[in-house]
Amino acid sequence: MQTENLIAIDEFCVKHDVELSFITSLKQTGLIEITTIEREWFIHTEQLKQLEKFIRLYYELDINLEGIETINHLLQRIETMQNELILLRNKLGIYE
Amino acid sequence: MNFVDYYKILGLTKSASAKDVKDAYRKLARKYHPDLNPNNEDAKTNFQQINEANEVLSDPDKRKKYDQYGKDWQHADEFEKQQQQQSQSSGSRSGGGFSGGQSAGDFSDFFESMFGGSRSGRGRQVKYRGEDYTTEIHLELIDAYKTHKQTLTVNGNNIRITIPAGVENGQIIKIAGHGGPGANGGPNGDLYITFSVANHPDIKRLGNNLYLTVDLDIYTAVLGGEITIDTLDGKVKLKVKPEIQNGTKVKLKGKGFPAYKNEGQFGDLQVTYSIKIPTNLTEKQKKLFEELRNSD
């Protein structure tokens, strides 16, 4: 994996003013994936948007970890259903 | 510029305490936060309004100014001058403003004119990724058939993008880094483009396959022949077998829609024959049909 696509968790925590324990909790629940290189934790840039969303839910909306897990699951279902809706609408267009 | 009733937005009265403001805001923010309402423009607008209301009502100085000058906000500058003459810098900042990927530019003109558009954030200076922008591109089916370039104007900036052939109706593509600027040195947001591909009056599309109904006169249907049909790729000659039945389907392989980002791959075109019975027959034609009927 190319190191330029990774962000050090320590640095991320300082810049975003979040506790390392929160990141650890997200890792333990499987909400984010952490890459370990020489005992240092990194997160892939592709997950950055998702991680920032979890931070907003936790710190700004006071939603606990269990709530974030539930919301994340439901948002994934919404996304799947929205995609299905698009496909079905397009299919319906044939008969209109 | 219209007066904005921040109390009404949060469902509060003027006598609301700081805790009431916080509670009302938190409740509404959980309902309308963009992270919880993906692709919901109404929720985004509501969230911006309640965020702005909270920004003012949770800050004692701003709330005082708003309460005092609210409807006569044009006099706010005079108020500011008086404050400066008193040489008292308050230096206070409010807490509890939610980001939600929102930038200062999302505040109303009313807010900007009263408070200058600045806002507080959570804790100390935090690098935030810029807001994601969304836009929609409307295409005709024929436009989506070929790869082409198009210039978009998003928030005043022109962006030239290549739209690959085969883009689907409702498909969303991401243009990285073309969203709002990041806060405090954070990266730019992304631009999400939703494609709206219009239905063609004659040709229907499902995935990469196209469906076309072609009218066939009764003589060609009975005796066979050659017809020319209009496809998205131009005119195509088609041999019709004799004694073809109404509703017969013919598949033309590779004459369908191009596969998205799979150059050279195409779906199929399915042609359905719709046999048209002649009308306004002449006496001679009627007689000939009679002869046909009696020839069995």
Image: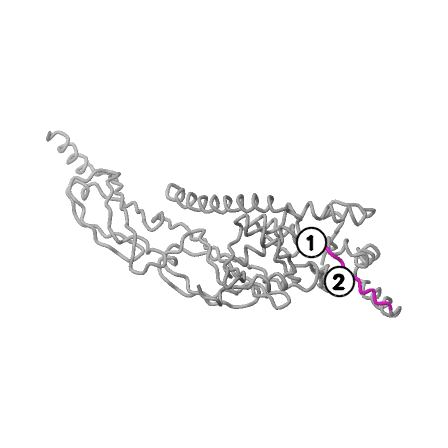
Image quarter of residue B219:
top left
Asked if residue B58 is positioned above or below residue A14 in the image, the reply reads above
The disc label shown at residue B115, or none: 2
Q: Nearer the viewer, residue B174 or B295?
A: B174
- The reply to whether the C-beta atoms of the residues labelled 2 and 1 are less than 8 Å apart is no
Can I make out residue B199 in this image? Answer: yes
Q: Nearer the viewer, mark 2 or mark 1?
A: 1
- Quick check: B97 above or below B240? below
In this orientation, which residue lies closer to the viewer: B61 or A26?
A26
Question: What range is drawn magenta here?
Answer: B88-96
- The front one of B217 and B17 is B17
- Residue B214 placement, left or right of B77: left
The residue at 42%/43% (across/down) is A88
Measured as percent of width and height from the top left, residue A80 is found at 47, 45
Please state which amino acid type lies under the numbered disc 2: Phe
Residue B209 placed where, x, y %? 32, 49
